[in-house]
Amino acid sequence: MNQSVQTVSDLIGTYALNIAIAIVIFIVGKWLASKLTDICIKILTKTKRVDATLLSFFRNIIYYILMVVVALTALKQLGVDTTSFFAILGAAGLAIGLALKDSLGNFASGVMIILFRPFKIGDYVTAGGSSGTVEEISIFNTILKTPDNQKLIIPNGSITQNTITNVNANPTRRVDLVVGIGYDDDIKKAKEILESILKSNELILQDKANTVAVSELGDSSVNFVVRGWVNTPDYWTVKFDLTEKIKTTFDNEGISIPFPQRDVHVYKHKN
């Protein structure tokens, strides 16, 4: 009887010790997980290449991964077979991955957008088949505002899987116009007028290679290409101004701008 009591007492003492050690492992491990997470985030912050949104996400991911390791270590100290836990976690991870395949794809695309920065907030882009000014970039989607003030919410997966056009990526852009004149008009005079219009516009960068040249002998017109470099924010202002200026100047100088015409010949049938 005394031996049985001693055995029970030893078992209680052993379990109590293991429980105490497991509790200490959990408390110390939690503290270490928090400190290691802070260190990792500080290292990422110093690189200055990781967005604040992504830093917050990385903080949670790193911390909870470390906490899983701490919890499994504590359970092992209690004599629990952690192999089965790994199997359960693996199966659960696979099931969740299959169920959230599209969401995880959008998440991965969001991480790529934040890391590689193909555009930033305030840029005008064409992405995922839509165009607008970037208002918000999140982990799962990107929000654009169209010129007519519509709000577009685009899944990040559709953005990274298609071509991205960033209008504001470079400080300068080239305004390209095609201007046609009649075959009976003076080509030299028209070219001089177009060059003068380019030089007189204060928003056109005169130190760039601006171009006026005959590009095509069309069906009903001689076509010029008119190309002028501008600062990106001035693109549409200059394009609209040039279009109007060319039309009014050509009208004043007697140079025609052909438009599609069709000659109809009517023959009277004689019986």
Image (cartoon, helix red, strand yellow):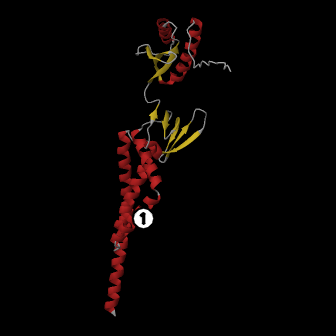
Give the image location of residue 117, x and y in percent: 42, 38
Q: Is residue 169 visible?
A: yes
Q: Nearer the viewer, residue 38 or 2?
A: 38
Q: Residue at x 48, y 48 (%)?
A: 140
Q: Residue at x 39, y 68 (%)?
A: 88
Q: Secondary structure at mark 1?
A: helix
Which quadrant would residue 145 be assigned to in this image?
top right
Give the image location of residue 74, x and y in percent: 36, 67
Q: Residue at x 55, y 8 (%)?
A: 255
- The residue carrying pointer 1 sits among few (fewer than 14), some (14 to 19) or many (20 or more) residues within 10 Å by Cα, namely few
Give the image location of residue 7, x and y in percent: 32, 86
Q: How many marks?
A: 1
| Residue type at the position of mark 1 | Ala
Q: Is residue 24 visible?
A: no
Look at the picture and state if 75 lies above or below 45: below
Residue 39 is left or right of residue 151, and the answer is left
Q: Nearer the viewer, residue 100 or 184?
A: 184
Look at the picture and state if 101 lies above or below 226: below
* Residue positioned most to the right: 271
Q: Residue at x 58, y 32 (%)?
A: 147
Look at the picture and state if 141 lies above or below 2: above
* Residue positioned most to the front: 271
Specify the quadrant that holds the N terminus. Answer: bottom left
Give the image location of residue 130, x and y in percent: 52, 38
Q: Which residue is mark 1?
A: 92
Specify the quadrant that holds the C terminus. Answer: top right
